[in-house]
Amino acid sequence: MSIVEKARQALLKYPLCDHCLGRLFASRGFMMSNEERGRSIKNVLFMEALNSSSGMYDEALLLALARSGHRESLMFLRRIGKDVKPQACFICGGLFNRINLSAIVAKVKELVNSSGIEFNSLQVGSIIDRAIIDNEIKVSTELGITSSESIKRELNRIIGKALVAELGKQYSKSNPDVVVKVNAMDGSVSLDVMPIYAEARYRKLLRGIPQVGGNSLASVVSELMSQLRPANTVIHVAGAEGPGVRVLGSGRPMVIEADKPLKRRIPAMVKVVNGIQLLGVKPANKSRIREIKSRAGELRRVYRVLVKLQGSVNEEQFKSLEDYFTNRQVTQLMGREKRVRLIYRLKVRPVSSDLAEFLIDSQGGFSIRRFINGEGTEPSIPGVLGFGAVPIEVDILNIAD
């Protein structure tokens, strides 16, 4: 069935405005708005209804077109003594005639100016009554039309074009700075400021700094990001280390999330603040959070551990320990979870009669302290040496990319 024939059936059953008729066939034709498309279809039906070659006219179709607000059909019927009053669109109820773009734009500008929000791109989301959506689905389903577009999408596009033209911003379908929410039923407007994500690697140069809490990595990052004036700042870290562990070398990967920031330019954060240094700060997106967290256990790392030995060890025993833990799998019980990780290499340097420095090159995602003291770990340093070992200091010297 042709577009014209389906449109005829639709209008004979329902009064439809130009927007809603055109939207039924939105995927047909380019460089036309739905309103232009609907108007053009009605004009074609009007010409068919007059059937000038035979001097006859299709009164039922002309009445349907007039009820839908088609100007030429209304004028023709008046000329032959039939005064028809246009009816409200069955789908939108006249929404497109009531919506006030100028007022919406003015409200958005007022919100932007009063809040001090800085942004480069926007997206629009509209709110309409459920009955309108149900009516739209009803018409499309009854006529078997698969070329339609949702009314929300058309409204978003119309409002978005007006805002872009007035505000001088870009429209972004996937990654906007701001989402403008418009209640099309009462004209009210609100703004949702999207989070900013920044990727970095942090170095923790002092001991006694936890990842979160007071005087923590999170608090330092929050202070550094404060110039963006966010509602809140959250860190997402690839793995974890205890407060007493230093993170050196190239640092540990993390993503910083600044929620509802009024400013959007990520600050340079290379200076050391309270023992924390951020390296390679760059823009990121939300998907990076999942990526770095899922890969945390895969990142190869090198530890330096100062160990107090509860027994004597000679050079030959140290060498035997190093050989044993070359490409050795280690199993740890972490609560109910059993983790198997690979230790690639272990080097030992005696410091005193009961102290030694261990360099451990391994997979991430397991407890280096438990590996040293033997808790829930097989094999472990105490298990191989035959006596206890206590980690005194732990440093992460490197975490691979």
Image (tube, rainbow, N blue to C red):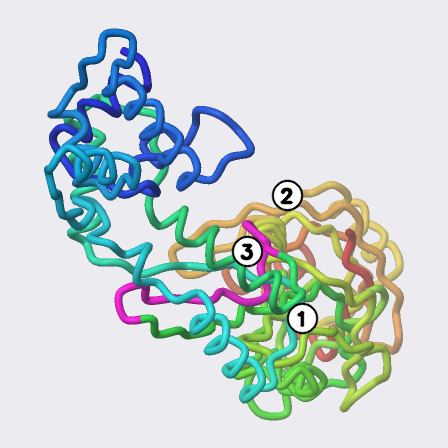
Magenta-highlighted residues: 171-186
The x, y position of residue 171, in whole percent, is 59, 55
Instruction: Quarter of the image for the N terminus: give it.
Output: top left
Question: How dense is the environment of label 2, judged by Cα within 10 Å: few (below 14), some, or many (20 and up)?
Answer: some
At label 1, which amino acid type do we have?
Ala
Residue 67 drawn above or below residue 167: above
Q: Which labelled disc corresponds to residue 161?
A: 3
Which is more toward the observer, 385 or 19? 19
Which is more toward the observer, 152 or 268? 152
Residue under the point 84% across and 64% down? 250
Residue under the point 89% across and 75% down? 351
At label 2, which amino acid type do we have?
Gln
At label 3, which amino acid type do we have?
Lys
Secondary element at tag 1 = strand
Give the CA distance from mark 3 to mark 2: 60 Å
Question: How dense is the environment of label 3, judged by Cα within 10 Å: few (below 14), some, or many (20 and up)?
Answer: some
Residue 109 drawn above or below residue 178: below
Q: In which quarter of the image is residue 202?
A: bottom right
Residue under the point 60% across and 67% down? 166
